[in-house]
Image (cartoon, rainbow, N blue to C red):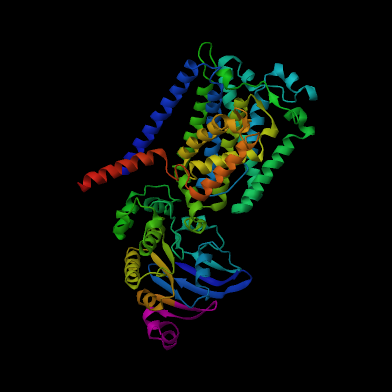
Amino acid sequence: MIQEKKSKKGAFIALVCVVVLLLLSIVLENTLDPIKNTTFFTVLRKGAVYALVASSMNLLNGFTGLFSLGQAGFMLVGAYTYAILTIPSASRESVYYLYGGSVVNFSLPELFGGGAFGLIFGVLLALILAGLVAAGVAWLIGLPVLRLKSDYLAIATLGFAEIIRAVLQWDKLGPVTNGANALKSFPTFSSFNLPGLRLSIFMAFLLAAICIAVILLLINSSYGRAFKAIREDEIAAEAMGINLAKHKRLSFCISSFFAGVGGGMFAMFANQAQAKTFTTAMTYEILLIVVIGGIGSISGSCIASFLYVAASEWWLRFLDTEMYIGTFKVPLLRNGFRMVVFSVVIMIVVLFFRKGIMGDKELPDLLRKRKAKAAGREGAK
Amino acid sequence: MLKIDDLRVNYGGIEAVKGIDFEVPEGKIVTLIGANGAGKSTILRTIAGLVKPATGRIRLQAEDITALSPDRIVSKGITLVPEGRHVFPDLTVLENLKIGAYLRTDSLDHDLEWVYSLFPRLKERSWQAAGTLSGGEQQMLAVGRALMSRPKLMMMDEPSLGLAPLVVKDIFSIIKKINDQGVTILLIEQNANMALHTADLAYVLETGRITLSGTGEELLRNEAVKKAYLG
């Protein structure tokens, strides 16, 4: 009972933190100079998107113990679904110029009557549909793939992600997917800016926070317990009456749903959706975030995603540009060296810091532990 | 309560169980004893639905439950305490217990109290990760977890495996206590001495066949059993 109260308190503290973060995002975006801080703002937006995708991957890899590498594929499905459903009718001709227009001739924001109302509901519905389509694809892929275990599952999902990418670039599907060309001019985070009040970062944070909250609720429900049981011991889980196939499929589809929503948000962040950006390398980036943050910790995934995005987009950028000190050319610094450094980081993490930043703890757990320690010390006195 | 007719099970191409019939009467402790590889575990796994039988029927109170899925069988009131305990190591003791009641939707408070009263040690450690418990405590947790599904029949696979003799004694006295409270128990054991002293009814299994049956006391006095299993 006492413990339950405490975890409620923890949830309350977390909620307050999230609200503060959301308010802070509005304040930051409207007080800092947007031109000088472009990189910082990019990091915040991309970090929010990656936090969601990393959390969805953690749900599958960390909590259910299914090692899947299909995340980029499901993001791609989500991004395309979102883009195809929201490109304004007026822009369709110019976006699909190679195919003489698109076969999908409606746009969700316009169906809702346009304006601010149409924008909000159109975008929300498109994101939800993006998730649902990704989940549907996951369900189909899951039928054969979820019979596999560990590395085999990873290889199979990786393969399917590549197949999805190839199919969406297929020329015959051009009138729907625009072939290998980018989809653009759909509503992005900046579309939510009001005159005099910029809300693009706030929107990214809000959407990510809602989705991550749903993932957290799921993990703390009895379904979440069943997922963890499957991760820990399949034999015992089955003997306790947990239907393995059903729960694995559920976890796979839910994870893909949020990867799909994350993909839609990634399109909003990048202002365009193109199949060639959703490569295996993207899955590895997300896997890196999950591992650094701690496998089995959602707060770890969130923290690590901002750290990772900041490092790759901002702090470590200098590694990719040639640098001269006086006339001395610093060795090794050239295009691509950043990825070498990242590879070394992941090796160090895997070898020496297996638990990542958070292990399998969440932020409220850390608070609780400190309190328990303090109480213990007082008791000792 | 549980009736098994002509059960045959193939396991990896080998016929592990070669046509057995036996019965578990309601409210009793029944034990299957036999050497390694006699097919004891296979029988329990088949009843639990984890392995599909080649032929034969398994009936629970006249209802055919042969080849139902494991979750359906658990919801019918049969639960298995797997060999080697198989607790969920990174989950807390309480979470382990709650997973035992996964298929139930009613309130668990009453049963949690019941399990904690049977195993006061688990209550003390309810917030500890199950992997940090001692072997005996883990066995208690595995039994408690199985009880959380409120079974009519609890099947136990080698509960004494790898435990100190004193702990084994504790476990068996608790098995008796659980049985007194109305749970039928089907137990398989290599520790034949302990099992036969506890059981109301016993079957001796040899390479997939039942060769002897009787009350626990009868088998304890049986010369062949003495020679083969009691030493």
Residue A272: image quadrant is top right
Residue A123 falls inside the magenta stretch:
no
Instruction: Name the residue nearer the viewer: A342 or A123.
Output: A342
Please state if A309 lies on the left or on the right of A7 as rendered: right
Quadrant where the N terminus of chain A is found in the figure: top left
Instruction: Name the residue nearer the viewer: A352 or B178.
Output: A352
**Which residue is situated farthest in the left direction here?**
A381
Residue B156 x, y percent position in the rendering: 43, 66
Give me the residue at 35% from left, 74% from top: B198
Please state if B126 lies on the left or on the right of A136 as rendered: left
Residue A277 x, y percent position in the rendering: 67, 33
**Which residue is situated farthest in the top direction here?**
A195
Residue A220: image quadrant is top left
What is the magenta range?
A: B203-231
Please state if A352 lies on the left or on the right of B135 as rendered: right
Residue A261 visible from this viewpoint: no
**Which residue is situated farthest in the bottom direction here?**
B223
